[in-house]
Amino acid sequence: MWAAQPRSTGPEARTPEMGEPALARSYGATFDGIAAEYDRARPGYPEELIDRACRLAGLASGDHVLEIGCGSGQLTRGLVDRGLRVTAVEPGAQLIALADHKLADSGAVEFIHARFEDAPVPGGHVRAVFSASAFHWIDPDVSWEKVARVLAPGGTLALLQYHGLEEPETKGDQDALLEALHRIAPEIAADWPVYRDLDAIVAGARQRRENVSEVWAWIGSHDVARPQARALFSDVQLAAVPTRLVQTADELNALFGTMSSYQRLSPAQCADLANETVAIYERLGRPIRSSTVAVLVTARRCGV
């Protein structure tokens, strides 16, 4: 099923021998240094997508699931609220501290402080593996096969993430922001994810549905597609919840400040981008409008 849901209102070091894809994945370590800001500025995930993932996985209260890259616990809270027992893998100590503080009273979460590639996770019996805005930070030569080993036969992989969405109503504002990015930080703009309309996202995912890694690479412009994933997972499904954001310059700059690409910029570039956002806001004389889509991709582990 390829479903668009109703519109919502609402530690790795750099080493010289790293190739470009591996180097890009290393930027995920920056989130731990801005844990509090990340927790404040990043949106949570739509309840209908979490419900859909749990329903497709056949989960019931008390079931054990694994979460990869729990961050400050935004998705973790939603899993715990549904009665699930969660093993959460996260490489950031400060992010774990935030998540633990939020969820300590639940007694339903075990944290593993490690990169997923190195984490001693249980194998072969977890009913579902979740990852929200984190799976592209994992080495794809490891991630797909390790998830398949962790899952029970027939278990479900559920990937969630927000992506920029192209819509006529917000295109002008988004184009102004992207133009500023190209002018001030061309090295970042060159790798910026492609914005597409929802029909194009769904159609492109449908064309690639025989390999979940190709679907995830297409949606997020991530270098994660691997041929071996085709034999590991089947029944790939997509659901999406579009959202229009209306933000002040301060709100938008706070969100920008939590992005891994922003952390790579010089102080001067950061200041110039922040000032440009303010200038766009003042020129428009109203909040800045943008479109995003929360995407859920699920796949079932092959085997019986």
Image (cartoon, rainbow, N blue to C red):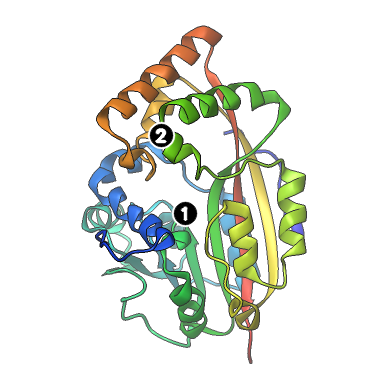
What residue is rendered at 27% in x and 53% in y? 95
Residue 293, x across and y down, in percent? 61, 43
Helix, strand or loop under label 2: helix
- Return the residue nearer the eye: 180 or 198: 180
Q: Nearer the viewer, residue 188 or 16?
A: 16
Where is residue 67 drawn, in percent x and y?
A: 42, 66
Where residue 146 sits: x, y (%)?
Answer: 45, 80
Residue positioned most to the front: 17
State whether residue 269 is above or below residue 100: above
The residue at 64%/39% (across/down) is 165
Say left or right for 251 vs 232: left
Q: Which residue is mark 1?
A: 133
The answer to whether residue 107 is left or right of residue 126 is left
Residue 255 has which mark?
2
- What secondary structure is marked by label 1? loop
Is residue 45 shown left or right of residue 262?
right
